Amino acid sequence: MLGTIDFSVSFSPVAQQAIAWLQAQHVEGWLVGGTVRDLLLHRPAHDLDLAVPSGGLRLAKRLADALGAAFFPLDAARDVGRAVLTEPDGSQTFVDVALLRGPSLAADLHLRDFTLNALALDIQNLDAGVIDVTGGLDDLSHRLLRVASGSSFRNDPLRILRGVRQALAFDLTWDAASLALARSHVNGLDLVAAERIRDELNRSFVYSRGDLAVRQLDDIGALAIVLPEIKALQGVTQAGPHRLDVFDHSLEVLRWMQTILRWSELADSPLSPEAQIAELLFPFDRALGAYLAQTVDQGHSRAGLLVWSALLHDIGKPATRQVDAAGAVTFDGHEALSGRLATSLLQRLAFSAEAVRLVARTCTEHRRAGALAGLIAGQPDRRQVYRFFAGAHPVGVEAALFSLADHLGAWGLELIPERWQARRRLVGTLLTAFFEQHAEQVQPTLLLDGREIMAELGLSPGPQVGALLAQLREEQAAGVINTAAAAWEFVRAGPAGAQGPGPGRRRGAAGDGGAGAAGEGTGPGGGSPRPGRGGPAGRPPAAGRPPRGPRRGPGNGKRGRPKKTRGGPAGTTGGPRRPPGASSQTRTQRAKTADAPPRGGPGAAHQGAAQGRREKAPQKGGERRPPGGPTTTARRGAPPHKPGDRKGAPGPPGGGRHPARHPQPAPAPPREGPQGELPRASGADQKGGRVG
């Protein structure tokens, strides 16, 4: 099955140059790990792992200098270096040179993770055959994943996650004894650095079948340790159209999302939904592919983060599940909670602030397109398209694609053709607007700028100008305003002349894509769209219920007594509002100024002076509030506020520097093709970097 190795085909041109130089220098060393495994599986060997008896750093530096390549000391303490070679097509080939881990090559191979990675080739005699001391050739022939030694997981518990990934990547079956060994060492994952767990999970979820990876992690017992939020989804039942619990639904959405991201491979699919996805996305092939390939940071692409969003999009459902008197199941507010929980989870795994933001936003907005579909009978107009992308920014494209996966994941085999066709048409309209009419419908260039408007209308910089510009942009996107003359007529008319929501109307209110959509979780099975800025609309008050007013009534203080206010007599609401351009002095300051008498009714000066005395009085605890300092005080009995306690923005696990405000520098891009070696990084592997 494995056959012979054709080195002239298996190695890239630059890799062949590196091997030729090493042979010419009579270097004693062996190609090891994933390099040999990939050669035996007839996969291109993009990178080379070389084990040498001594002088790893020095040899890597000499090789880099000889071939005009870059050199990096990966681990100076362990004498490990890397030469980064550039191929003719611009891609890179890594040559890692490391010391043998034991006194001999055989000892080194026994210290590796799995037998398929414990294979070697003599660099000076590649044709001599594969060196195998652990039975890796036989295991590879039988597609069996077996540990190289009984201490493999004890030496590095992360190898459990790596085993899951390699089993999926190479279509391997776990050896029964190795699987039992993994289960017995699964608690050791608590001591593994978060960055290493992040990278291993990312490879499993993004570059292979993520849904199968999650199920293997659960079978081994690792899911509850590395992703307890996903484990908690098991057994959380939903109402129709859902036929699966939240756990299985999330994995089904993850499977469909990865299918959608392979749209270019689906054109010849005999299956109806897959072929229809290919037909829908083919017109945007190049633009959509370039958009999803954008690298955010840490090597994460938008496509990869969309996979994480699919996995995490419903993690807020267990905490929001309710059953009413009629037995209807709802998950009100689960979208917003899912976004917050995704933020906490990804910060725990040391994702970058930008990656966290994009995934959390996608989770929060994952039902926006479905809500728009439920609001309209046909296709959205230009105003609705504009509001969709304005509300979902900066993940409008992700939200549109997500609605396809969520729809398929919810309905499954009971997919209703008419609904599915309507959803595809909606997504096609949204993608057309984004990729082909972006400057007209998504982000039109304003016909007027803020300086012109302020000069013409005599306004000062402030929210009023921003609101006018926002309304003007929406009217342009809607096609209502197309000339500068029409723009001037609009802004001179003021906010009352706008058809849009206006500065005082919350974006996402009813009528702009905020209503619930039948099909994936609305009504009895899903929960209402979340209230709040930028998201689908909140629900209107129940029929017959008056809008909620102040709890104590206007102007009332405790126990219904008239509330005393500064600047006016007791029981009044105070003096008139300060007009634009008026002094911003406090009433106390104005009371002390002869030419600026205090405003308000009788006794205002006395009340202002009394207020001044109150401001000068020391606060409880003997501390004074500094001028301009915060005035908000904690409610009685509340715990002291700590950094990161702001609602919706949890702080870092275990305290310390907030990862969103103090991002760590991005690590070097992960190697393609695992080599079965212990990682060389040392600082992040200590107990202090463990997953919480």
Image (cartoon, grey):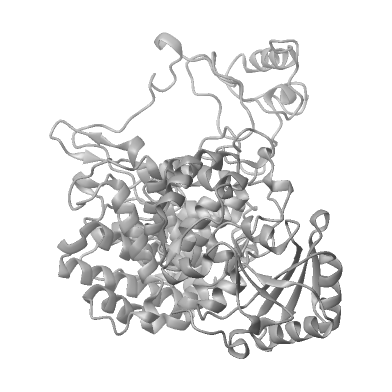
Q: Is residue 600 left or right of residue 583?
A: left
Q: Is residue 592 left or right of residue 557?
A: right
| Residue reaching furthest to the left | 326
Q: In the shown orientation, is residue 58 left or right of residue 144?
A: right
Residue 172 position by quadrant? bottom left
Residue 321 at what x, y percent from top left?
29, 37
User: Which residue is pictured at 43% across the width and 63% down the height?
Assistant: 144
Instruction: Please state the horizontal and vertical placement of residue 251, each as a whole percent of the image.
Output: 34, 55
Which of 259/375 is in front? 259
Residue 318, percent from left and from top: 33, 38
Question: What quarter of the picture does the C terminus occupy?
Answer: top right
Q: Residue at x 40, y 45 (%)?
A: 230
Decide if residue 535 is on the left or right side of residue 578: left
Q: Where 519 sits versus 427, above or below? A: above
Image quadrant where residue 148 sits:
bottom right
Q: Is residue 69 above or below residue 158?
A: below
Q: Position of residue 331 (x, y in %)?
A: 29, 41
Give above or below for 571 relative to 176: above
Which residue is drawn at the image coordinates 39% and 18% (left, top)? 552
For this rendering, which residue is in front, 439 or 49?
49
